[in-house]
Image: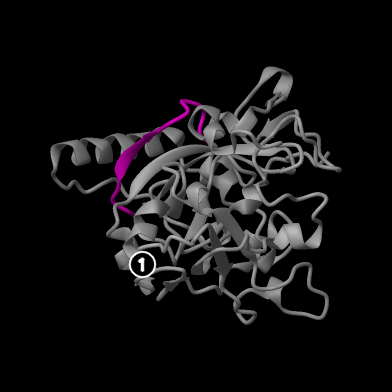
Amino acid sequence: MRRYRPTAIPGSEITPESSYFGRRDILRMAAAGGFALAAPSLALSASQTELQFTPGGYDPKEEITPEADATSYNNFYEFGTGKADPAANSGDFKPRPWSIKVDGLVNKPAEFDLDALMALGLEERIYRMRCVEAWSMVIPWIGVSLASLIEKVEPQGSAKYVAFETVVRPAEMPGQSGIFQPLNWPYVEGLRLDEARHPLTILSMGMYGKTLPNQNGAPVRLVTPWKYGFKGIKSIVRITLTEEQPASTWNQIAPGEYGFYANVNPAVDHPRWSQATENRVGGGGFFGSNDRPTLPFNGYGDEVASLYAGMDLKANF
């Protein structure tokens, strides 16, 4: 099993957890009081800006993964196949200006720029994230309900699924250029329409109080916390409502290893990684171990298990 190894980033460059939580408290008070405050400044990359948001009411009350780990240990094959490649190779990517086309089986197809998406109401959602490679994090995402965007375009009665497509820019995304490509581009993903409309599902545009860094899927990515991380398609440019189940990139490449649903399930192992336990990135544990049991639906079963009532989750993995 592939194990998480700490980054070589010195502690002096990691945003102190106390500073992050202090900023969250100030924003929470500002939202509750209906007035604006100038939040303490955090270090920003050239492409990032601070965000104003309201608490979304989701918080597992677990230790949040240090920002330096969450932004330096990533899977984003458009920038390379190594965990450090996205942070190292995404500096030339330009996340603005940006827009997402929403079309297919809808009455009002439209294109939304970032301002229009943020106007749907930015919330902070602190979610567990579980990778199929058996490592996990706890991340304070900032985003909008995907359901609120879907309602804007008025789905037709025949729509049953939602397809997502990422951007293709080989000049800015070095993982998309060269003779030997690890994946087919564009990266595509899909959800059932009821999964896409579920209150837990968000389009994230930020994390740790700021806009998404390039290596984490700037400027817009999908977050479905009860599914494995590879369902979280990044740098989305198109969302299409369909009647047929859409393709998903990893399912196309290895259907025996990566199911369409990809719900976190400790009872269904991946051929290379047991799903019974997970290794939490960052934080501490006994004798330096961060291993812990994996929870069905990543701990969100009370909210989402009813979506799959009557389904064989070993066959529909």
Q: Is residue 185 left or right of residue 53?
A: right
Q: Nearer the viewer, residue 256 or 53?
A: 256
Q: Which residue is mark 1?
A: 114
Q: Residue 251, position in %: x, y? A: 74, 57
Magenta stretch: includes residue 63: yes
Relative placement, left or right, of 208 versus 253 is: left
Locate residue 281, reporting x and y percent. 64, 36
Q: Label the magenta part by its dominant secondary structure.
A: loop
Residue 188 sits above or below residue 269 on the image: below
Q: Where does residue 53 sit, x and y in percent of width and height? A: 30, 48
Quarter the C terminus occupies: top right
Find the magenta span and give its range: 51-64
Q: Nearer the viewer, residue 301 or 225?
A: 301
- Above or below 22: residue 131: below
Using the rendered view, name the quadrant where residue 205 is placed.
Answer: bottom left
User: Does residue 153 appear to the left or right of 301 in the view shown?
Assistant: left
The answer to whether one can see residue 73 in this image is no
Above or below, comparing residue 184 to residue 33 in the picture: below
Which residue extends farthest right? 271
* Vertical position of residue 193 compared to residue 235: above or below: above
